[in-house]
Amino acid sequence: MGFAELHLHLEGTLEPELAFELAERNQLTLPWRDVDDLRSRFDYGCLQDFLDIYYANMAVLRTEADFAELTDAYLARAARAGVVRAEVFLDLQAHTARGVPAEVVLAGVSDALSRSEVDHGVSSGLIVTFLRHLSADDAECAYDQALATGVELLGIGLCSSEVGFPAAPFAPLWQRARADGLHTVAHAGEEGGPDYVWEALRELKVERVDHGIRAVEDPSLVAHLAEQRIPLTSCPLSNVRLKAVPHLAAHPLPAMLDAGLLVTVNSDDPAYFGGYLDDNLVAVRDQFGLRQDQLDTLACNSIEASFLPAAEKARLL
Ligand code: ADE
Ligand code: ZN
């Protein structure tokens, strides 16, 4: 059975080799000597350490072709990892803030996504993620820009720095997107505690929680998530690299499975965290000795947690 990848930032698939190639093509200088120098910095103390490098590297993405090439490279790699469905995140504001128009960004990404089923056997959807370190007004403005392009969106999400950046101010935008027929998700419970997950559920009324690993610290939250079958898109290698957990053995994935949570495995920012979806699955299988039936559960969970229509889910399950 194939997997759905539900927590994947397109910009986080920018491999150092492609970053330097695009820098040369666009006559830009990256703040790193070379590919090895950049890779040597992939040792982060926390989420913000990673985000600083991630946003800096985005400078090389300038043209429609750049965005299409980035997206297509991910889809090709995802297909090799066993992905049959990809619901990908795009940090639109990180590009418009640099002067790249929303039309350029979305035309490139949607061009690659529209060919994905035929070229790679991967069905896809696009989720525009808003940056919680920026204001809700900025997010509204980016949402307007995204809609004005006419590019089809699957949903909206919330990401970037978590602790100290409440989700509540974004509630009116999440309500608006829901009224527009879009799906809604949000990062919560990655570095922030269970209260951040509760806030995403109560204020934003999200359908899925991205990461959500710290939900396990609150039994009443675990019971609520299990009862409502609210999916949690966990990213084990990301959590290790960003020190959300001290090491893989301490990852709560087995506890989440045992609690009957609708948990999935995803790669988050694979170019920065040492692995794509298949690498994440091998890592947790080997670390926790997961049986084939547990791996099958993870595959089924990913399809169930996707935003595919029911008939399409049934076909893939
Ligand atoms: N943006 C890209 N990756 C992220 C992560 N793991 N958490 C929050 N924002 C992100
Ligand atoms: Zn993420």
Image: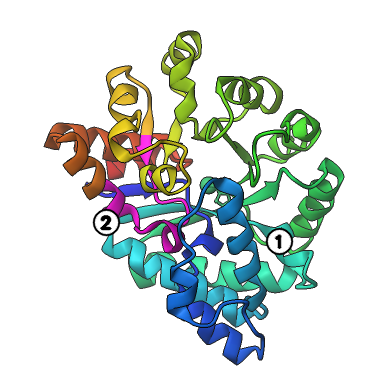
Mark 1, ligand 1, within 8 Å: the answer is no
Q: Disc 2 residue type? A: Gly
Which residue is labeled 2 in the image? 82
Q: How is the image coloured?
A: rainbow
Q: In which quarter of the image is the C terminus?
A: top left
Is any part of residue 202 visible from this angle? yes
Q: Residue 247 placed where, x, y %? A: 34, 39
Q: Residue 91 placed where, x, y %? A: 65, 57
Going from N to C along the chain, the mark reached first, 2 or 1, is: 2
Q: Residue 60 appears in which quarter of the rendering?
A: bottom right
- On the picture, is 135 further left or further right than 39? right
**Is residue 139 inside the magenta stretch?**
no
Look at the picture and state if 251 lies above or below 40: above
Q: Give the range drawn in magenta.
A: 264-281
Mark 2 or 1: the one toward you: 1
The residue under the point 45% across, 10% down is: 219
Q: Residue 220 placed where, x, y %? A: 49, 8
The residue under the point 15% across, 32% down is: 293
Is any part of residue 127 visible from this angle? no
**Which numbered dot is residue 310?**
none
Secondary structure at badge 2 equals loop
Q: Residue 118 placed where, x, y %? A: 38, 70
Which residue is labeled 1 in the image? 94
Q: Residue 137 appears in which quarter of the rendering?
A: top right
The residue under the point 79% across, 54% down is: 142
Residue 301 or residue 314, whichever sits in front: 301
Secondary structure at badge 1 equals helix
Distance between the alpha carbons at the discs numbered 2 and 1: 29 Å
Q: Disc 1 residue type? A: Ala
Label 1 crowding class (10 Å Cα cut-off): few <14, some 14-19, many 20+? some
- On the picture, is 235 further left or further right than 203? left
Residue 244 or residue 58, whichever sits in front: 244
